[in-house]
Image: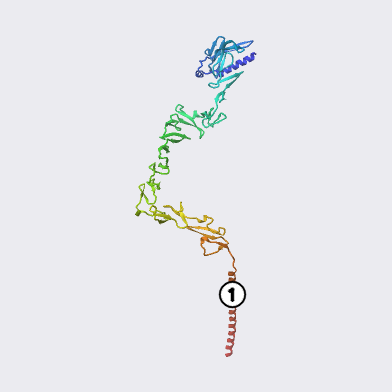
């Protein structure tokens, strides 16, 4: 072995010792003895024996190396960070011919020569291999090498934290978190003070760190950066972007930064209005009174229980019964009256139970039933929605009116019978008749003839008058 190689190995071991020498605190955690500030290195070759002893400095701080307390010395064996065990050193045909003390490394250490074991630094409980100057961590199944240490892979049993996603056994962390399992929120040291009282947690929704008091009965005041009692009352306090949010206990609702009682009971949904009033949305068969859902019993199986705008219980009783103090009480026969809607007609019957029936006028029906029930409004029937209402939809249009309808001829058509029922109008194409035209022309010709005759008569008379006047004038002259 050349001197150059020995020198390189010597220098590398010095460098390795700088990296692998354990601090006192770490050695105590591992149950190892304390160390002094120097160690010995011995490398044997066929030509040279090199032996040296030196101190190791790292960034100006004296590193603690292995002392004689780390050595296990037995006959023919020196073992640094291990133990000398009597093992077979020479075997022939499966039979041990010679035994001797051999250096066996402690867990988490690897042997670099017959006498020296160095710390693997692959994580607690993990070993490594050493080949030439290369150290390789030996990680079992379910682990992978991360930052030169064996790290557990993420799984269902060991999921990623703070919203990270497990991809092929490794966590892909959200912005603002780090660590093998995204367990370390960033900026926690600068965001939350008083680490003994306050913990830094990651809010997955806003992807930001937030502070939370370790005493859950207290809340963290972001403005004053202190823990103080939660003003919510019956609930826990949380901040969202420095906005206080009350997570109230069951039976309470948040109102103006406080948890107020809001429990309707009987499966009702409680709500606090903007004015601070408690409103109960009760299940069918219940009614609300003074912030509680109570069973609605009107003492009649056909009665319908409701509440008015003031929250008062109202019983809608069947005919023959009347709501008296929240109960359906049977009325005397003389006190009974027609309970049909004003748009409906009341028809008296011989039935002792239902003495009146409600009916609608022709062209109307009940709003919810063909024959209206008690109190049900009558509405117009739109007969034109039925394509078969008019006899022939190709020649007629259906026009709906309140309570009735008519069938009107389309353009270019005329009724076949003008006296027929307008709901049964039939139409035919408009026929052009020349008789009226001939009569009109005859009348016009007659009028023209009469006019011409009158003009001729007037002209003839005018000429006769002129002739008579001339004769009379000549006769007068003759007499003179």
Against 452, residue 48 (above or below) is above
Disc tally is 1
- Of 395 and 176, nearer the camera is 395
Against 464, residue 263 (above or below) is above
Q: Quadrant of the N terminus?
A: top right
Q: Quadrant of residue 7?
A: top right
Q: Position of residue 193 (x, y in %)?
A: 47, 28
Against 473, residue 248 (above or below) is above
* Element under disc 1: helix
Please state if 106 lies on the left or on the right of 377 as rendered. Answer: right
Q: Quadrant of residue 452?
A: bottom right
The residue depicted at 59 percent of the width and 74 percent of the height is 446
Please state if 315 lies on the left or on the right of 16 as rendered. Answer: left
Against 343, residue 450 (above or below) is below
Which residue is label 1 attached to? Answer: 446
Q: Please indicate, yes or no, whether residue 480 appears anywhere in the rendered image.
A: no
- Of 381 and 68, nearer the camera is 381
The residue depicted at 61 percent of the width and 16 percent of the height is 9
Q: Position of residue 301 (x, y in %)?
A: 40, 46
Q: Position of residue 8 (x, y in %)?
A: 62, 16
Q: Please indicate, yes or no, whether residue 383 appears anywhere in the rendered image.
A: yes
Give the class, few, some or many, for how many residues have Cα within 10 Å of label 1's Cα (few <14, many ≥20). few
The residue depicted at 46 percent of the width and 34 percent of the height is 239
Q: Position of residue 369 (x, y in %)?
A: 46, 52
Q: Residue furthest right?
A: 2
């Amino acid at each position: 072995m050349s001197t150059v190689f020995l020198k390189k190995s010597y220098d590398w071991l010095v460098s390795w010792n700088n990296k692998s020498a354990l601090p006192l605190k770490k050695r105590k955690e591992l149950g190892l003895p304390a160390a002094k500030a120097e160690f010995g290195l011995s490398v044997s070759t066929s030509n040279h024996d090199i032996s040296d002893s030196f101190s190791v400095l790292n960034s100006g701080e004296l590193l603690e190396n292995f002392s004689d307390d780390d050595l296990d010395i037995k006959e023919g064996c020196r073992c640094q960070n291990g133990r000398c065990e009597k093992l077979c050193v020479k075997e022939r045909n499966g039979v041990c011919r010679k035994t001797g003390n051999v250096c066996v490394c402690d867990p988490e250490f690897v042997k670099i020569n017959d006498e020296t074991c160095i710390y693997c630094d692959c994580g607690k409980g993990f070993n490594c291999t050493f080949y030439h100057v290369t150290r390789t961590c030996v990680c079992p199944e379910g682990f992978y090498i991360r930052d030169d240490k064996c790290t557990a892979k993420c799984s269902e049993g060991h999921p990623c934290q703070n919203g990270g996603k497990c991809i092929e056994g490794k966590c892909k962390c959200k912005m603002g978190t780090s660590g093998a399992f995204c367990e370390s929120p960033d900026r926690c040291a600068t965001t939350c003070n008083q680490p003994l009282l306050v913990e830094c947690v990651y809010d997955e929704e806003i992807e930001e760190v937030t502070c939370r008091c370790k005493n859950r009965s207290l809340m963290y005041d972001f403005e004053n950066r202190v823990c103080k009692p939660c003003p919510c009352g019956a609930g826990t306090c949380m901040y969202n972007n420095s906005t206080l949010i009350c997570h109230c206990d069951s039976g309470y609702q948040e109102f103006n930064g406080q948890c107020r009682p809001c429990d309707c009971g009987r499966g009702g949904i409680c709500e606090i209005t903007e004015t601070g009033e408690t409103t109960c949305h009760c299940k069918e068969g219940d009614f609300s009174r003074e912030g509680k859902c109570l069973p609605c019993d009107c003492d009649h199986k056909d009665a319908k229980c409701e509440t008015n705008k003031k929250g008062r219980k109202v019983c809608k009783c069947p005919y023959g019964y009347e709501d008296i103090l929240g109960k359906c009480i049977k009325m005397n026969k003389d006190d009974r009256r027609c309970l049909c809607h004003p748009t409906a007609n009341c028809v008296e019957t011989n039935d002792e139970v239902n003495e009146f029936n409600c009916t609608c006028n022709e062209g109307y029906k009940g709003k919810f039933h063909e024959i209206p029930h008690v109190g049900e409004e009558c509405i117009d029937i739109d007969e034109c929605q039925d394509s078969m209402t008019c006899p022939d939809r190709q020649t007629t249009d259906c026009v709906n009116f309140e309570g009735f309808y008519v069938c009107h001829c389309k353009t270019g058509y005329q009724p076949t019978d003008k006296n027929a029922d307008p709901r049964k109008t039939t139409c035919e194409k408009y026929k052009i008749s020349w008789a009226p035209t001939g009569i009109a022309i005859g009348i016009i010709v007659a009028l023209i003839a009469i006019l011409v005759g009158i003009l001729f008569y007037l002209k003839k008379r005018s000429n006769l008058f002129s002739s008579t006047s001339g004769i009379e004038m000549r006769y007068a002259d003759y007499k003179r």
